[in-house]
Image (cartoon, rainbow, N blue to C red):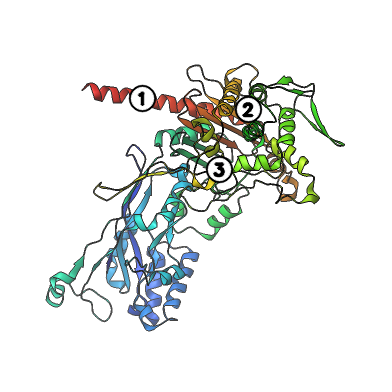
Amino acid sequence: LFVPADRGSLLDRNGKTLVDNRPSFDVYMTPAYCKGREKEEVMTKLAVYLQMTPEDVEQMRLSYQKSWVKDRLERFKPFLVEVDIPRDQVDVLEAHHSELTCVDLIPTPHRNYRVGPSLGHVIGYMSEVMPDEIDSSQNDEDDYSYRRGQSIGRGGLERRWERELRGKDGKENIAVDAKGRHLGKEIDELLIPEGERKIDATPGNNLVLSIDARLQEAADTAFPGRAGAVVVMEAKTGFIRALVSRPSFDPNKMSMRISRTELAKLTGDPLKPMLNRVMTENYHPGSTFKVVTSLAALEKGVIGTQTTTFCGGGYTMGNHRWRCDKPTGHGALTVKSALQYSCDVFYYSAGDRAGIDALSDMAHRLGYGQPTGLDLGREISGIIPNSSTINPATGSLRAHAINASIGQGEINVTPLQQAVAYAAIANGGTVWKPQIIQRIESPDGKVLKEFKPEPDVNNGREGKLGVKPEYLAAVRAGLTAVVNEPGGTAYRSRLPDIRFAGKTGTAQVVKLGQKQNLKTDAQQYFSRDHAWFASFAPAEDPEIVVIVLNEHGGWGAEAAAPVASKIIKAWSDIKKQDDTKSMARAEQ
């Protein structure tokens, strides 16, 4: 018999348990020990005792049949019938154990996800190991092979850190008769040497995350949208403090044997709850991309920190005119006031004169257009076009630069890339690799590995933005004005006791609602623009970056900025509470 190992726990940065294990029982059947009529009797009784669905019974019969197709040894390997059965069913099986000669109740620790759907995409879930995974694990030199019925991490940290979390199962050798029935402890002691009777399991290691459970809850509560993402990241280190992708899924439910109906409901949902919007979906950034255009144009010398560009309500190139959101125009603007009022014409002009390649270069230096490197699983690169990737049939390079200057056209970014870019602007020019694990600990609490802040070496400059400090200062001044000065697009979201900076964005979407065969209200939803707000706080000495994407939420100023404001307020309150506790401990 195998003795399942306790899987490692996941804790937040303050030691609060997010995921641990609870005792439970799984039901296994060994085909070689019941055949013919006896097999039918056992299966019929199991179906009744375990209140199995027709789908579960079908799966049990299929697993039994497969055991006789392969080599002779396969039929002696137990397969999983039911996972994590309730206590009353355990009592029933124990009472009828003599009737179920080929059935075993195996005590198995099962995952206990204490955070629900909020961190579903971060943590992932567990499910039964597949046959191909069993086969590929048999040659593992470190003896991490899998058996039928065991669970394996799926998605998120459970999958990425499977080896660290899993531990090693133990073994218990017992004496059995031809039917697989235990002959008793006395026979065990007589036939099996003491040193071979039991090998204890080795628990898995624990992961201490950079997530703050309090801030995670605040971010999840503050976000009102049906779909979207929130990223809260430390501006000076790249460690993630909160991460929300909505809609999400319940890891507890996903880690059970989910029915075909429930799975079809999840996969068929047009809002795609299994999709991690933080890093595996990309969007037009809208006006949040104007910080990139600002820095590219400043570095190119087509604008200065104090020079002005006149907005008369539109920008003309050839026979095409791009309009500003203010038809009468904003008048003469510096880069600070252009960000404050989010003037499109200022950026049409700046992007046109800087050129698409200058915009592309600055975007890549800020971390756009390539995976950020967050160690959480699959990540997409987004799209940052340049003169060599643009199809001439889709328009001139100048036209592409004008569209890209305000985060439209072919530009697509992930919310996580936004966090990396805005952190670099906030901290003075260091592009950090985002991280979500602070350290790995042994089961007894010994630190096995501590993760330090890492610059993002994929930006082409060893993690350095390489922009003059005065250019970054001008952009930060504009972002501060967005929130704290009258006329700023996020002025209504300002806070009385903490100055923060940010940029609103409203990203146009392709009107796909009517093409998706959806109901009228769903068509209207999917035709609305995406709402962005990219921010950092405090404005003068930034500690955190907060990115909010409210998918199909409408205006960034209305559907994203207020969310970030609430999260920043929660962060400030938590920080004050922690500082007070630290002072009290120091005085003791």
Q: Indicate which disc, 1 or 3, sits on the residue closer to the N terminus.
A: 3
Q: Secondary structure beneath disc 3?
A: loop
Q: Quadrant of residue 363?
A: top right
- Looking at the image, tell me whether mark 2 or mark 3 is earlier in sequence order: 3
Q: CA distance from mark 1 to mark 3?
A: 34 Å
Residue 367's disc is: 3
Check disc 1 and give the amino acid type.
Gln
**Residue under circle 1?**
577
On the picture, is 563 further left or further right than 115?
Answer: right
x, y percent for residue 298 = 64, 30
> In the picture, which quadrant includes the C terminus?
top left
Real-space CA distance between mark 1 and mark 2, rounded to the nearest whole angstrom:
29 Å
Q: Residues within 10 Å of mark 2 (few under 14, many from 20)?
A: some
**Residue nearer the viewer, 106 or 583:** 583
Horizontal arrangement in the rendering, residue 314 relative to residue 45 (left or right): right
Q: Residue 485 placed where, x, y %? A: 60, 17
Q: Residues within 10 Å of mark 3 (few under 14, many from 20)?
A: many
Q: Is residue 430 left or right of residue 506?
A: left
Looking at the rendered structure, the kind of residue marked 2 is Glu
User: In the rendered image, is residue 511 in sight?
Assistant: yes
Q: In this picture, is 561 found above or below 410?
A: above
Label tally: 3
List the residue tagged with mark 2. Answer: 558
Q: Residue at x 18, y 70 (%)?
A: 197
Badge 1 crowding class, 10 Å Cα cut-off, few under 14, some 14 to 19, many 20 or more, is few
Q: At label 3, which amino acid type do we have?
A: Gly
The residue closer to the viewer here, 257 or 471, is 471
Q: Nearer the viewer, residue 66 or 314?
A: 314
Residue at the image point whose x is 49% and y is 37% from the top? 430
